[in-house]
Image (tube, coloured by chain):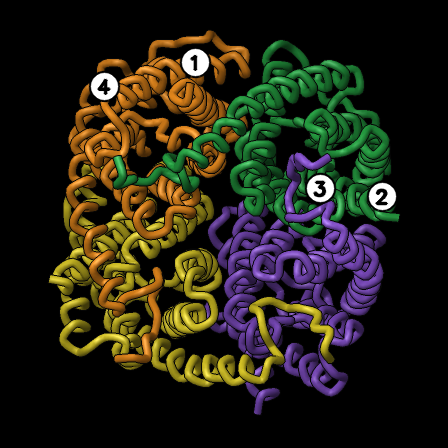
Chain colours: A green, B purple, C yellow, D orange
């Protein structure tokens, strides 16, 4: 029963995340008179805002992964068991696809549309690796240092990553797969999906390794009482 | 006397909310040289910001509903009695209309203008249902998990919903009615109002049902000590 | 000595506030290719952000008024004495003018420029009254209900008020006077200043009266234990 | 070992900061159809968001300086020793350059490009002095009054400073040096770097002096119990 409720939370969260990513892209392009800078400001702002909401609202029930790369990282860290992780991923993929269809329905479009937006090449793949590395580092170190801030951290990180990566930062295999089913602003060609996913899992793996080094650090320092707090301070005891 | 103060808070909050929704729409269109993407960025940003302020400022006095769908949900949950709920709704509707007139006055326009902006069709109705479902889920689960964050959650949610729904997310029957009295950016035709309201109450009802399942979950888990905190964490006890 | 430090804080805060209001207006117009919607997004975003910073940073030293209308309201509420209030206002006006000159210097413009931007008429005056009413209500009720949030509340309120009022919300007599010394985006004709100031003080007075009603409410309720917290909640005791 | 982990945190943070500054500039220009106002909104928003994330995530490990001017200020304040400060600066410079190259790689551009964007003259130099003065004041007084807010304060300050200064606020010698290796939106001519750095260190020095006056104030007042809290309040004991 507890698992079912966690899966309901994962489903609703992933569905609303995809509806926001795709829907705000459609609305942005519809209103921005061809200026994709304005469309991406709207797309990034809406995605950041809904991530903050969804992680606060569903976090206590499921952990608010909404992302197979996060679920796999949590499995590696031992936070969830293999059976739960597999159920999460299945639900995430199905809910992501329904979220895309919901966005299309809200804009009176065909429910599923094979993606046509070409996204390939070394810059794109590097971008997805960097984007997912940064996302997982944000989650893992944020959870270690300031867990209550994780919803705001993830939202802020994704806003930045939409802009600083060459791929606009998918950083999520379920999102990538689902976005291959829209021809709108947020779409991707189905043939470009596997390379994106490979880059994302590589970035995730690197983040888990780096977080293991940096998160351990913190605990030691605390016990030695030298670096406390989570902001630059002017200690008076040195 | 306590009720009168609560009604004053509902009145001021709803009035300032509508003044912001309509006023920022007028200013956005006036300045954006026909680029409605920029106008909606301004409209969504201003609405999100004022919601954060109004809920912090009036919340302790009235609960900061500003929305008959919220008031009805609170009645269903038993948080307020029927007489208070009815008084809230009457005040919300009157204050919303005054707020629209105030916005028009600040821009030297006719105080009330029968709306001419057509908003109809399955996509629009679905959008209002989804928008209100998400808003109520945000409020109910936010209040259950992190009550101090509700003002920021509602602001962030509405920013996203302005962009990801096909209707720009009215999500409020009093706001919908009042917006039928402006011909500006935020307006709606009076004949389109009833279907919007029906969709909003349907979305609200679904949210109350879903929140009842998910909010209950949290309490149980806490007592079993397995999912604590409200962000993805890396528990070490598993 | 304590007063001198408070005056230094008021001076630095007001100076940096004006440098931001005027400087971001100049930069916005310079970059936005004539689209004043983009310029106002930048102007409002920069002003909101710096207000959050300045109130956190200077609040503990001076209360972070930066505004004669706030100082007068604090005098009415008995928070500061008359002599301190008069010193604050003198410093605010001088620092505001220096802030305008600093903005001009950073953009290689003449240090002081008699304003030429006409801002008059009933809509403008109503706007300034509403803007200042809302600002003071935000400060007074925010300080009563959630003091640590006042910096974010003021920033968010001003972002919204830049957009929802017909005057772009000066809401500050010292700022109004200083902005009559720039011909840039943020400027105002000197002859339009007195009516703006009168509207601002009227709005302030109304806010003090309304806050006295609503802030008192809260204390009573808390003692009766019925409305606690500062967000819509679902009490279970009714 | 502790120093190595701190250096890893400084390296990752500075690298990701530069990747964001340069990458979001490239993306902004690519999408904004020549409207640099939209590009700077994206650039400022992305930079502010990533600063919030990086300071939360790396602050407990290294203090999250990412900036030789901050490191020197911390050395002056006695927060770190000389050897650590020198190691920080070396790592910051190297990581900043790698961050620029990473941004270029994500957009399939030449890894290092000698900067061609002229930035010189009194307005620019004054701007860098003011920008760095404000940044250091924000950090030092923020750490004194509300340390947990420093990540949000720095992000908000930089968003404002991108807009209110004539130079778009580099405010960081390592960032300035690294940005001389890109020909994109965020670039600067190598010959303009030394004057920027001199202005930045001058602004930093002034901020340390002013912070010493204002931060001391706070402690005294607290002990006298008159100005407590960090927001304008209405004390009832006067």
Q: Secondary structure at mark 3?
A: loop
For the residues carrying marks 2 and 4, which lies nearer the camera in this image?
Answer: 2
Q: Which residue is situated farthest in the front direction here?
A: A223
Identify the residue shown where x is 43% and y is 16%: D100
- Quadrant in the rendering for residue B80: bottom right
Of B39 and C34, nearer the camera is B39
Residue B31 horizontal/vertical position (percent): 47, 51
Q: Earlier in the sequence, mark 4 or mark 1?
A: 1
Of A83 and B142, nearer the camera is A83
Label 2 to label 4: alpha-carbon separation: 60 Å
User: What crowding class fits label 2: few (fewer than 14 Cα within 10 Å), some (14-19), or many (20 or more)?
Assistant: few
Identify the residue shown where x is 22% and y is 24%: D197
Q: Chain of mark 1?
A: D
Identify the residue shown where x is 52% and y is 51%: B42
Answer whether labels 3 and 1 touch (C-beta < 8 Å). no
Of B25 and D41, nearer the camera is D41
Query: According to the image, label 3 marks what residue?
Result: A63
Answer whether labels 2 and 3 touch (C-beta < 8 Å). no
- Quadrant in the rendering for residue D228: bottom left
Query: According to the image, label 1 marks what residue?
Result: D98
Disc 4 and disc 1 on one polypeptide chain: yes
Q: Secondary structure at mark 4?
A: helix
Q: Is residue C214 visible?
A: yes
């Amino acid at each position: 029963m507890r698992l079912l409720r966690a899966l309901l939370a994962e489903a609703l969260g992933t569905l609303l995340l995809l509806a926001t990513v795709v829907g705000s892209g459609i609305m942005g392009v519809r209103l921005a008179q061809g200026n994709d800078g304005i469309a991406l400001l709207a797309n990034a702002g809406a995605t950041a805002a809904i991530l903050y909401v969804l992680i606060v609202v569903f976090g206590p029930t499921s952990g608010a992964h909404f992302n197979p790369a996060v679920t796999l990282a949590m499995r590696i860290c031992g936070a969830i068991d293999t059976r739960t992780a597999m159920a999460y991923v299945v639900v995430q993929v199905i809910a992501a696809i329904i979220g895309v269809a919901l966005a299309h329905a809200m804009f009176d479009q065909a429910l599923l549309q094979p993606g046509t937006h070409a996204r390939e090449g070394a810059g794109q793949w590097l971008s997805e690796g960097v984007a997912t590395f940064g996302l997982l580092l944000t989650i893992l170190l944020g959870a270690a240092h300031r867990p209550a801030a994780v919803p705001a951290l993830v939202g802020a990180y994704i806003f930045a990553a939409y802009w600083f990566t060459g791929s606009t930062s998918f950083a999520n295999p379920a999102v990538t797969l689902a976005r291959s089913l829209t021809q709108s602003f947020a779409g991707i060609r189905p043939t470009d999906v596997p390379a994106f996913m490979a880059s994302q899992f590589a970035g995730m793996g690197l983040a888990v390794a780096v977080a293991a080094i940096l998160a351990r650090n913190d605990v030691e320092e605390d016990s030695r009482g030298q670096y406390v707090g989570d902001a630059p301070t002017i200690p008076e005891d040195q």
